[in-house]
Amino acid sequence: MDIEQLRYFLAISRYHNMTLAADHLYISQSSLSKHILQLEDEIGLKLFDRDERTLRLNSAGHEFVNFAEKMLSTYNEMMNKMQQYRRTAEGQLTLGSIPIMSQYDIHCAIAAFAKLYPDITIQTVEEKGDHILKMLDNEQLDLAIVRTATLSTNSYKVIPLVNDEMVLVANKTHSLATKRPLPLKEAAKESFIMLDSGPGLYDLCLSACAKAGFSPSIRYQHTRIETIIGFVAENIGVSLLMKKVISFFPHPDIVCIELEEPIRSTVSLAFPHGKKLSPSANLFRNFLIKWFKKQPG
């Protein structure tokens, strides 16, 4: 039994579905299934009642959840303390980010920084916004890159880096494809394909729809942009995504439709108020601010 197996088990216990859990963990469904079977073999008990679509915890599974959560919490606490010791060295920093590093050229900024300061090591973590903020609060990260909408300025020092704008994404043959700019209320009867629920873009989408006077009919939710684009390209629904993000995944069968009332989002660098940054983290913060100021658009 290892820590990853515990994480995998808890993910399935949360989602009750192998596909959704695999998407959340960014691993294949077959690999996830193999790890869970190995865990059950080691314990000598089945932890789930299975049917064609869902996995439900049985009595043993419910009991195992309590132990798994305690073991994982202790492990995370241990690693957090040890990481604090490792990061006392001046030449190290840990950066957390929502999964947008490529779409917003953050990887280019990191590469430019690395060339300028080759003695500083940057460790990067890409996760959902709520997880990144939890790691930041637990001092597992020096700095975080998240959407400003998820942040409380009372808790975090927020430094805006890049702005983006939401667009409606549809198949090029869709009836809304030629309506630009589009009043969002005209999409009220459409089926939507959304990013997985949680703070950030999902909440921004729901808020935008509510402001337009409707609650969206959500047909599918996925964690991967390319999966959403694939469904939209098949014309089984529309989506709301950020313009710069969608431009990173070009597809000949989709169009991006600007909205009549712009819905904007800002990607920012954040760290807790009162946190004393290490020399390396402070150097990277200043570099990142200057780097994005020089970027076009």
Image: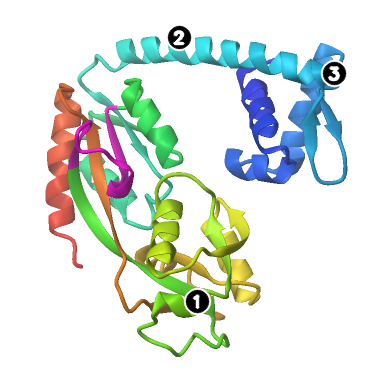
User: Does residue 73 lie above or below 222 as drawn?
Assistant: above
Determine if residue 124 is in view: no
SS at mark 1 in the image: helix
Identify the image quadrant of residue 209.
Answer: bottom left
Q: CA distance from mark 2 to mark 1?
A: 49 Å
Query: Which quarter shows the C terminus?
Result: bottom left
The type of residue carrying mark 2 is: Met
The picture places residue 244, in percent across and down from the top left corner, at: 35, 65
Comparing 88 with 145, the one in front is 145
Could you say which disc has been placed on residue 78 in the image?
A: 2
Q: Which residues are magenta?
A: 142-158
The picture places residue 172, in percent across and down from the top left corner, at: 54, 85
Q: Give the left or right position of residue 149, taking residue 210 as reference.
A: left
Q: Specify which label sits upstream in the sequence, 2 or 1.
A: 2
Mark 2: few/some/many CA within 10 Å (<14, 14-19, 20+): few
Could you say which disc has been placed on residue 41 in the image?
A: 3
The picture places residue 184, in percent across and down from the top left corner, at: 42, 75
Are the residues tagged 2 and 3 within 8 Å (C-beta)? no
Mark 1: few/some/many CA within 10 Å (<14, 14-19, 20+): some
Determine if residue 210 is in view: yes
* Residue 147 in magenta stretch: yes
Q: Specify which label sits upstream in the sequence, 2 or 3.
A: 3
SS at mark 2 in the image: helix
Q: Tell me the colour scheme of the image.
A: rainbow
The type of residue carrying mark 3 is: Asp
Comparing 292 with 157, the one in front is 157
SS at mark 3 in the image: helix
